[in-house]
Image (spheres, grey):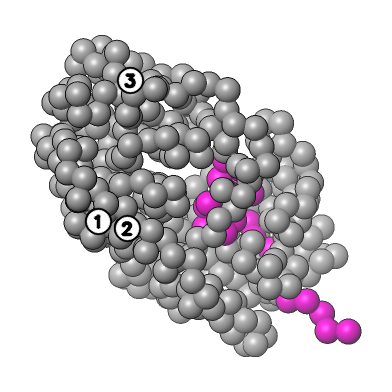
Amino acid sequence: MTKKPSILVVVPYGFNDRLINFPEFTLSRLLAKHDWHVRGLTRREDGESLYETTHGIDVYRYGATLRGTLRLLQLLLFERPDIIHVHMLRNNRVGALAALLSKIFRIALVFSEAGLLHDHYLVDDRDDPLGKPVHYERVARHPWQGIRSYLFHFAFTHADTAVFYSKHNVPIAKRLGARNVHYIPLIVDDARQRASEVRDRGSRPLPEEPFGLFVGQMKERKGWDVLLRAIALTPRETVPKFVFVSSSAATEPDAFAKLVDTLGVRDRIQFLGQASNAELQSAFERASLVVVPSRYEGFGLVPLEAFETGKPVIASRVEALTDYLVHEENVLLVPPDDPERLAECIVQLALDEKLRTRIIDGGVRTRAEMESDAGTLKWLNFYQQLIAKG
């Protein structure tokens, strides 16, 4: 009997409904669907079980790093995957250990990162890194260059293959001397929509009036402050309300609340905070438009989630987003950190039905292309070639 190809995917967090569209989860679902034995290793979040099988993936979770290390050793000793794929550097100590052990066990090591400029060694300002100096010299390839940097970057600097789903990572990775650097466009599936269909809708009410939607962490790089300033410049009758959904904050952060009150837009804001998968799906379905005012994105999943529900998008013209967003075809692109121009585009999209229809249709086409067999085949071929190399 032929042994199934197997992979261990190590991430700092994930494999849950909240992060259902994250690349590592999407790619793991793809492999499981095509008869791979997929195991995921990740930190345990509140309420999660230590082990479960979801979407055909065996997911192992840990609380403390020591427990994660013991689970990792168990998986390597007794399961012996063909490939270890480490996603992301930050908050991923077990991923660094997995990379080190891949060399000892002689297992192929793959590394991916949504955005290399999230790296605090590479940039001084992770919230606004574009156009700023990149400190390549701080990434240690050898322990004598700095032990902390060396261990932090081990999964990247020692990977047999680095694969990225955002083009802007490729020249950075090559400049840092990464081996076998690949760019493969990200794929998507309908897992969020299917998961929402079998769960109750969220109980928290959404505005009855038309509303704009922001989804993202309450980090400055996500540009929530830019959107708030744009709302203050947008006539109430165009888009009366704006809903903010954040995975990083259950309640309004102080800086957010202070700016809302300073701008006098309290009555136009609903801060939903952390939302269930069903609540998030409902917010996308009921929104009039979706705004992505980021200063920097590693990839940018929110427009794709908007496309899934047929919503028009306004987004910043920044790298990663411009990999698949084209101005006036599937989005309205605006300069980052420009609330005046953002407000103009919100009004334009709200009032121009013809433009809105064109943007929505373009988004639906883009989403279909990223769900196509051609896209999934590129990823399957990538992994299968790694297996063939042995």
| Displayed quadrant of residue 351 | top left
Three-letter amino acid code of the residue under disc 3:
Ile
Q: In terms of sequence position, does the residue under pointer 3 or pointer 2 come before the other?
A: 3
* Residue 153, percent from left and from top: 48, 58
Residue located farthest toward the right when viewing the structure as drawn: 1
Q: Residue furthest front?
A: 354
- Above or below, 167 against 262 in this view is below
Q: Kindly identify which numbered label has been placed on residue 358.
A: 1
Which residue is nearer to you in this view: 265 or 250? 265
Region rendered in magenta? 1-26
Give percent across and percent down for residue 207.
40, 22
Q: Residues within 10 Å of mark 1 (few under 14, many from 20)?
A: some
97 relative to 368, above or below: above
In reply to whether residue 3 is colored magenta, the answer given is yes
Q: Residue drawn at (25%, 56%), measured in percent from left and top?
A: 358
x and y, in percent, of residue 49 in the image: 77, 39
Say left or right for 306 vs 61.
Answer: left
Name the residue at 11% across, 34% down.
340
Where is the C terminus found, in terms of image quarters? bottom right
On the image, the x and y values in percent for residue 266 come to: 29, 13
Residue position for label 2: 361
Mark number displayed over residue 269: 3
- Amino acid on which the number 2 mark rests in the picture: Asp
Task: For residue 180, say whether it is visible.
Answer: yes
Give residue 84's quadrant in the image.
bottom right
Residue at image point 71% right, 31% down: 47
Per the model, the C-alpha gap separating discs 3 and 2 is: 28 Å
Of the image marks 3 and 1, the number of the one nearer the N terminus:
3
